[in-house]
Image (cartoon, rainbow, N blue to C red):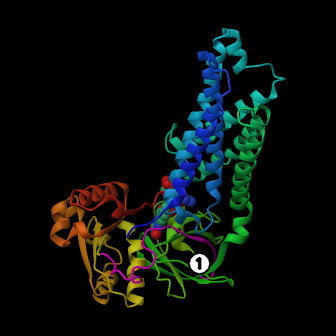
Amino acid sequence: MKKNWPGRGLIWGFLVLLAIICLASMRGSDLGSPGALLNYLGRVTGILGLAMLLLAAALIARVPGFDRHFGGLTKLWKTHHFLGAGALLLLMAHPVLLALGAAETSLSAALSTLFPPLSNIGTWLGWGALLFMMVFLAPSFSFFGQPEYQRWKWIHRLAGPAVILSLAHILYFGRTLTAGLDMALWVVLALLAVGAVVWRLILSGRMGSLRFEVAEVASVANNLVELSLKPAGRRKLNYQAGQFVYLTPYDKSLDAGYGEEHPYTISSSPTEDRLRIAIKDLGDASRAIRTIQPGSRVHIEGPYGDFFPSDPDKGDQPAPPELWVAGGIGITPFLGRARHLAATGQSLDICLVYCVQDEARARFLKELESLAEQIPGMKLITHYFYREGPLDGEFLARHCPELDQRSVYICGPLPLTDLAKNLVINAGVRRKDIHTEEFELL
Ligand SMILES: Cc1cc2nc3c(=O)[nH]c(=O)nc-3n(C[C@H](O)[C@H](O)[C@H](O)COP(=O)(O)OP(=O)(O)OC[C@H]3O[C@@H](n4cnc5c(N)ncnc54)[C@H](O)[C@@H]3O)c2cc1C
């Protein structure tokens, strides 16, 4: 099923337009020498770099539903990441190009472009912004190894001063574009960025999250629990099967993760009164959640994600057959969708290939078998890595007829996702029919 995600296209379209406007404004400038050209390129990289930084900041708002314009929050974060990386590269090139431009006059002109007297506040504000950017972006690119997630999040807040200093810098030097355009550009982008930060850090906790109470903690295995949550406020969470939320527990008895938000897929059907979330212990907070007390409060923010088609049973066309490939805890979106299809009596041609290491790790297997019996067209196939080795094309073709006709949904560890993607591409599935959900937002 074809999905339309205009978000990324709009951002790139805007940046291309801005680049064209910058280049068009070169007309009339005296660019007769290499030095003048380098100076001009230095200014253009500054403008484009700052625009990318502000757009990256605007994307952090995480307003539920907005991510669907990007194909889900994971894809939105990738755009954010790309914009951040692009901004850093352009803003590092910016002073170098300006200095090279000045070097045509003399070495001391180049040095004083880079390091003018302290009274030249505008330039030093720019250096301050660049320094903050290097510090807050270094962990994102794992320059010093993979940082601990919560520490990374704190360091990332230095993006705030970087944005403020960059805007102050442009107030001193914004003279490349015409005055009106210059003002309009930075006011709009700054409002978007500041609005997003204010929403994320101040308002979303109060206005964007919903209060729930832990009703039940079901132990599925020694490292996996399924929480059942009932609404504790007036607002209801409207979601689609397979979407995910950020869950913040407020149980003081927890060893770790009190007041920390973590993303988890909703494993219940939207038709249920309670929200169910299956959590595997993959770290401190997810391990501690096994001991969360019934009756304690949790906050839920979302829903996010755009993994499955909105409503497979509506429309004139019959829904295309599907292949679901799940790896380990990556079963949760499929569990949620299968529960929903069964609860609403829908039929769908689905091959679910559930990949686990061995029988003992095939969580929810009994329930999945029962769901496959209730959903006309659903077939469940288990793949045990220890016994059968890596998943291969022959296994898929043997169990799933007409593979190339299927829309494919994959959720699991990255190596399995990459492998399954390659296998179905080799089997003739078109790239646009392959959808992946990653349990890794960075
Ligand atoms: C879209 C999505 C859906 C998910 N659904 C499920 C699910 O249904 N069931 C399940 O058991 N797990 C799910 N996860 C994984 C779950 O979020 C992590 O296991 C959990 O956050 C780990 O936190 P920790 O403190 O226990 O471990 P840590 O050791 O702190 O973290 C382990 C890794 O999890 C990631 N992580 C930690 N905190 C966050 C955070 N706040 N935001 C983003 N990534 C984070 C980091 O990459 C980190 O390296 C999902 C993740 C994503 C992105």
- Residue 365: percent from left, percent from top: 31, 78
Instruction: Establish if 7 lies above or below 409.
Output: above
Q: Residue at x 71, y 32 (%)?
A: 176
Crowding at dot 1, Cα within 10 Å, few <14 / some 14-19 / many 20+, comes out as some
The kind of secondary structure the magenta stretch mainly shows is loop
Write the start and end of the magenta stretch as one range: 294-320
Q: Residue at x 65, y 50 (%)?
A: 57
Could you say whether the residue bearing mark 1 is in a helix, strand or loop? loop
Question: Does the segment drawn in magenta span residue 309?
Answer: yes
Q: Residue at x 65, y 54 (%)?
A: 58
- Residue 405: percent from left, percent from top: 25, 69
The image quarter containing residue 393 is: bottom left
Q: Residue at x 22, y 58 (%)?
A: 390
Residue closest to the eye, 256 or 351 = 351
Q: Amino acid at mark 1?
A: Gln
Q: Is residue 280 visible?
A: no
Q: Is residue 270 visible?
A: yes
- Residue 276: percent from left, percent from top: 50, 79
Question: Does the segment drawn in magenta span residue 68?
Answer: no
Q: So how many labels did they put on this image?
A: 1
Beta carbon of the mark 1 residue lies under 8 A of ligand 1: no
Q: Residue furthest front?
A: 28
Residue closest to the eye, 183 or 348 = 183
The image quarter containing residue 423 is: bottom left
Residue closest to the eye, 204 or 176 = 176
